Image (cartoon, grey):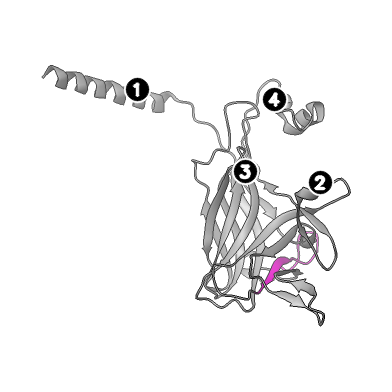
Amino acid sequence: MKVTYTAAATLIVMLFLLCSSSLFSEERPAILNTVVLEDFDKDPLSRWIARGSKFTTRIYDANNKVVGIYPKVAEVATFPTSLFGFKGAKTANGDDRKVLGIMGKFDRNGYNYIEVLPVREADSNTDPSDVIYEDINTSKKWVHNPIQVPGRVEFFDVWVWGANYDYYLDAHFRDYRGIPHTFKMGDLKYAGWRNLRIVIPKSIPQAEPYIPKIKPLELTKFVLWTRPNERVSGFYLYLDQVKVLTDVYVDRFDGDDLADVDLTEKVWGSNSE
């Protein structure tokens, strides 16, 4: 009986401590904002490329030289009316709304994929090992340029046009430790525009106790996957309005200007960590 009483007493103490910590712990304020990471309205082909997996179709000339390769990318002057309405063809600046279009084609059925990556054009100072893609038509070289997501992300969504193929779309992120995270946005077996949305789990770290506390995620790419029983002889995909719902609250304190990452890099260099 003595052992039973001791165990019961221990359980009561643990429950008291748990309740006390929840009652007296200070809740962190939150400021939730919708942030558009990419709208594709202005020259998206200077920021995005698409590349296919092993069996992506190549185009040959009469001398059996490769003169083209799928997937192809294009900017298209259109928009999802479910989002902008029938009169939403123009942006606030009066420009045409645009979306990113991808045309894919593979030589074999299977789990083929197309990576859609944010990039920047390589310059004369670029390390050749950093080049991830070279356009065989323009000879332009591209370097991976992940999109940094502000704040602590709670939801991520993108508008995707499907053509009723049995494919699906993934979104890839990387946290501040360099660990990749892959999320299935959803199946694409539908016709027209849909908003695909995911919740970012709390288990993925986006902050730490040290200053600067916020450790943003990076959007590294989208990946379109085909399924083995679906045709791959030619298909289209369109993307628009990549955005997040994110908590942008930042603690304020005397000297918080010294926590600014840009200032730190300016004073101490990019390798200050």
| Residue closest to the eye, 211 or 165 | 165
Q: Amino acid at mark 1?
A: Leu
The label shown at residue 17 is 1
User: Mark 2 to mark 3: distance in Å?
Assistant: 25 Å
Amino acid type at circle 4 is: Asp
Q: Is residue 88 in view?
A: no
Q: Nearer the viewer, mark 4 or mark 3?
A: 3
Please give the label number shown on residue 217: 3
Q: Nearer the viewer, mark 1 or mark 3?
A: 3
Q: CA distance from mark 1 to mark 4?
A: 33 Å
Under tag 1, what secondary structure? helix
Instruction: Residue 100: tell me if it is visible.
Output: yes
Whether label 1 touches label 3, CB < 8 Å: no
Q: x and y percent of residue 65 in the render?
A: 80, 75
Ranked by sequence position, the earlier of labels 1 and 4 is: 1
On the image, which quarter does residue 77 sit in?
bottom right
Q: Earlier in the sequence, mark 1 or mark 3?
A: 1
Q: Secondary structure at mark 2?
A: loop
Which residue is nearer to you in this view: 93 or 73? 73
Q: Earlier in the sequence, mark 1 or mark 2?
A: 1
Q: Earlier in the sequence, mark 4 or mark 2?
A: 2
Residue ID for mark 4? 256
Query: In the image, residue 45 lies at what x, y percent?
Result: 78, 62
Q: Residues within 10 Å of mark 1 (few under 14, many from 20)?
A: few
Q: Position of residue 186 (x, y in %)?
A: 52, 62
Q: Amino acid at mark 2?
A: Asp
Measured in 3D between alpha carbons, the distance from the residue under mark 4 to the one under mark 3, in whole angstroms, is 21 Å
x, y percent for residue 102: 69, 69
Residue name at image x 89 percent, y 49 percent:
124
Q: Residue furthest top?
A: 2
Which segment did they paint magenta? 88-105
